[in-house]
Image (cartoon, rainbow, N blue to C red):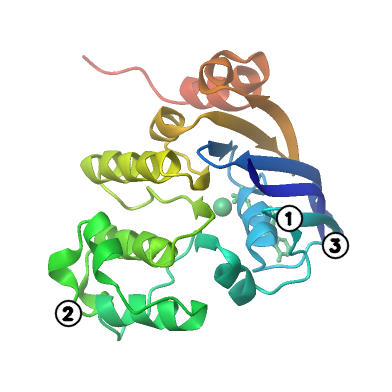
Amino acid sequence: MTILEATGLRVVRGERTLLRDVDLSVAAGEVLGVLGPSGAGKSTLFRAITGETRADSGVVRLAGEDVTREPLWRRAQLGVGYVPQGPSVLWELTVRENLETFQRITGAPLTPEPSAAAVGLAARLGVRAGELSAGERRRLELARAICKRPKVLVCDEPFAGVDPTGAAHLGGLLADLARDGVAVVLADHHVAEALAVCTRALLLLDGAVEVDATPDEFREHPVVQGRYLGTWTRSIPPPLV
Ligand SMILES: Nc1ncnc2c1ncn2[C@@H]1O[C@H](COP(=O)(O)OP(=O)(O)O)[C@@H](O)[C@H]1O
Ligand SMILES: [Mg+2]
């Protein structure tokens, strides 16, 4: 079942067209990777989907309902979980208070424990968010996105600032959520970690979807190799030993 469907999303800012009529759909149980170099428009796409920004044209549907005109908080209530790219915890509040604040906004029961436990923060509920490590803060942002069970979870670089063990754990958590019926949309520069959990991957270049493929096809795709991964691997010097 298609949970999130965006059609013809276009975002223009000043002289620049940041999104060029992007179509995207993700079904329950799918993990869709949106990959591409910095500046490709991944975050702009996610903002348009979640309601953080308004698209200039196009339609966003959540479980068949047109939410194009709904603001961020309303989409959150309707089941759009969102981990934005930049830091977004409430620094002075504890982990518990961060989660409860979001649960109040979305009208969910005040039960922060399960989502804190899911991201490994059960023992940190009483700690101020400002005192958490960068990786723990990222996990808190994910806990916030799932503390009211979302229909779709939109994660913008969830592995950023998280160590490799933590990234593998987060990847496993996203896969578990998908198995549980959540539709997941994920952007990240940790291509290996992202593709390991994706069921499908898009390559976004200059605001347009250039490739839509399975993870295996994606890795080998000539456009991906030529304009994204290939150029990127070539820029890494060979190991010294
Ligand atoms: N509000 C804005 N006004 C003008 N340009 C913007 C705005 N937001 C993002 N951009 C530009 O749009 C391009 C895409 O940005 P972004 O969506 O953050 O890409 P990505 O997440 O793929 O790195 C970048 O060149 C960025 O500088
Ligand atoms: Mg981004």
Sequence-first disc among 1 and 3: 3
* Residue at which label 3 appears: 56
Spot occupied by residue 215 in the image (x, y as percentages of width and height): 52, 23
Q: Secondary structure at mark 2?
A: loop
State the quadrant of the N terminus.
top right
Q: Is residue 94 left or right of residue 204?
A: left
Spot occupied by residue 30 in the image (x, y as percentages of width and height): 53, 37
Spot occupied by residue 109 in the image (x, y as percentages of width and height): 38, 77
State the quadrant of the C terminus.
top left
Give the CA distance from mark 1 to mark 3: 16 Å
Query: In the rendered image, is residue 119 in sight?
Result: no
| Residue 237 to residue 138: above or below | above
What amino acid type should be assigned to the residue bearing mark 1?
Arg
| Residue 235 to residue 148: above or below | above
Q: Is residue 12 left or right of residue 178?
A: right
* Residue at which label 1 appears: 61
Q: Mark 1–mark 3 contact, CB under 8 Å?
A: no
**Ligand 1 in which quarter:** bottom right
Q: Is residue 125 left or right of residue 103?
A: left
**Which residue occupies 38% across, 74% down?**
89
Give the CA distance from mark 1 to mark 2: 37 Å
Depth check, front residue: 101 or 52: 101
* Residue at which label 2 appears: 126
Q: Is residue 141 left or right of residue 17?
A: left
Task: Report whether the residue tagged 3 is closer than 8 Å to ligand 1.
Answer: no
